[in-house]
Image: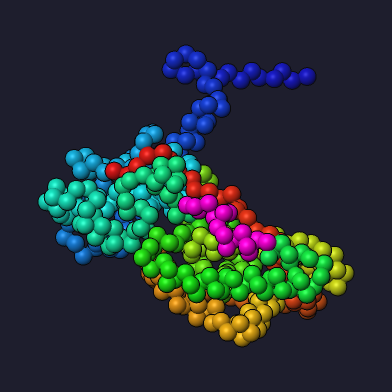
Amino acid sequence: MRKRKSQKRSKTSAGKYPQKPGASEQKQQASAELKTAWLKQLYTHHAWIIEKHLSYSPYASRLKPLIDLMHDKSRWGFWDPEKNLIGLNYNMILTCPWSTVTGILLHETAHQLVSVLEPHQSSREGPHGPTFQKYCELLHLDPVFRHPGTDEMTAKYPPSPFGPRTENQEHPLLVKIQKLLALGDSPEPAEAQSALAMAGRLMAKHNIELPKADQKAGFDSYERRLILLNSTQISSRVRIIASILNRHFFVKSILCYLYNPQLNRTERTLEVMGRPVNLVMAEHVFHFLMERTETLWQYHKPLALAAGEKGLGAKNSFICSLLNAFYTKLDEAETESRVRDGLESSDVILGSDTLLQDYYSLCYPTARSTYSRSPSSFSPFSQKAGTEAGRNLSISQPIGDTGGGSRGLNGYLE
C-alpha cells in the first residue's frame, strides 16, 4: 500500500492559510464588478450622445465628465461644474428601467452643456431656464425629464415614462370597455360579437375626439411603457403582435434594445407610446396574445407530432399563421364597423393625431418600422390549424391595470 504524500498548503505573508472568499465577500466582489459595468455603460452612452449631437462643437473635447454613483435618498442625480462630475443615484439603477437612468444622465448632461458652453446664461436664468431647455431639445430628451420639481401624483418624484402616472383603472371609458369585453365571454355569439364591436367603436370615437381636446396638454397627454421581453432575440410572434397594436389599438410601438443592469446584458424590449387608456389596453392585448398563442400551441403540439411536424418550425408556422389570421379578422371587423357607423379608418384616426406622431418622432427621430407578418417556416398542417385558430380567436377577457406602476426614488433633479 502506497503512502499518500501530504500536500502542504502555502502560507500567506500574514502567516495564515489562504481562505476561499465567503458569501459576503463574493457579493461585494459581484457588486463591484456590476458597478464597473454600469459606469462603462454610462460613459459609453454619454460619449455617444456628445458625438451624435455636438461633434461639430470646438468644445467637444471638454465635454468628458467624471461619472460616479452615489447613495442618496433625496436626489436622482446632480452636476458639479467645479469637479466636472455627474453623480447618479445607485439605488435608481437597481429599481428603475435603464431608460430612466439614461434619462437622468441626459438631464445632467444638459446642465453640463449649459455650464460649459454658455456659463453666463446659467447665472442669469437659473438652473432650468430657456437655455437648459434648449439643450434638452438638442439631446431629444423626453419631456418628463426636463423639469426639476416633484410630482405629487407619483409620490413626490419625477414620473417614469414607463408606467402609468394616473389611476387608469378609474378612467370612465376604460370601465365601460371593461364591461363590454367581459360580455365577450357570453355564451350567446350574437351578444358577444355585439359587445366586442361596441368596444371597438368606443375606442375609435374616443381617439377621434381626444386629439382636439388635448391640444393644450401637448406631450403631457402621452406616456410610454416598456414591455420587457427578457430575451436577447425578437421572435416573429412579438413582431406580429407589435404590428397588431400599431394598427388597431391607437398606439405607436417600437422594438428596441435595453441594457439590463442586474444581468449586465443588453436585451430586446417593446416600447409602447400613447394615451394612458390606450396603453392599458395595448399592454393587456400583448400579454393576452402571448399567453393565448402559447396555450393553443400546446394543445396543437401532439397533433403536429402525429402529422410528422415538430420542432421550432412547426411552432412558428402555427403561431405566425394564427396571428396573421387574427390580424386579418380584426381588419375585416374594423372595416365593417367603420362603414356601418360612418367612422374613419384606424389609419386615418391615428394619422390625425399629429401630436402622437410628433411625440414618437421626438423619442425616436430615425426609427423605421420593420415588422413582418410572414411565418418564418412552412409546415402545412400546423399552418392550416393556426389559421383556423386565429379566425376563432377573440380578445374577450376583461382588462385591468397590469400592476406596472411607476417606480422611482423620492427625490428631485438638480
217 and 272: which one is in front?
Answer: 217
Q: Is residue 122 left or right of residue 185?
A: left
Quarter of the figure with residue 411? top left
- The answer to if 175 sits in the magenta stretch is yes
Q: Is residue 294 left or right of residue 217?
A: right
- The answer to if 413 sits in the magenta stretch is no
Q: Which residues are magenta?
A: 163-179
Is residue 336 shown above or below 279?
below
Is residue 26 shown above or below 386?
above
Position in image of residue 269 (x %, y %): 53, 59
Q: Residue at x 61, y 20 (%)?
A: 7
| Residue at the far top in the pictured view | 15
Is any part of residue 381 visible from this angle? Answer: yes
Position in image of residue 359 (x %, y %): 40, 67
| Residue at the far right in the pictured view | 306
Q: Residue at x 27, y 62 (%)?
A: 138
Quadrant of the rendering where the N terminus is positioned:
top right
Position in image of residue 263 (x %, y %): 53, 46
Q: Residue at x 19, y 48 (%)?
A: 126
Q: Main secondary structure of the magenta part?
A: helix
Quadrant of the rendering where the C terminus is positioned:
top left
| Residue at the far left in the pictured view | 120
Q: Is residue 100 left or right of residue 235?
A: left
290 and 411: which one is in front?
Answer: 411
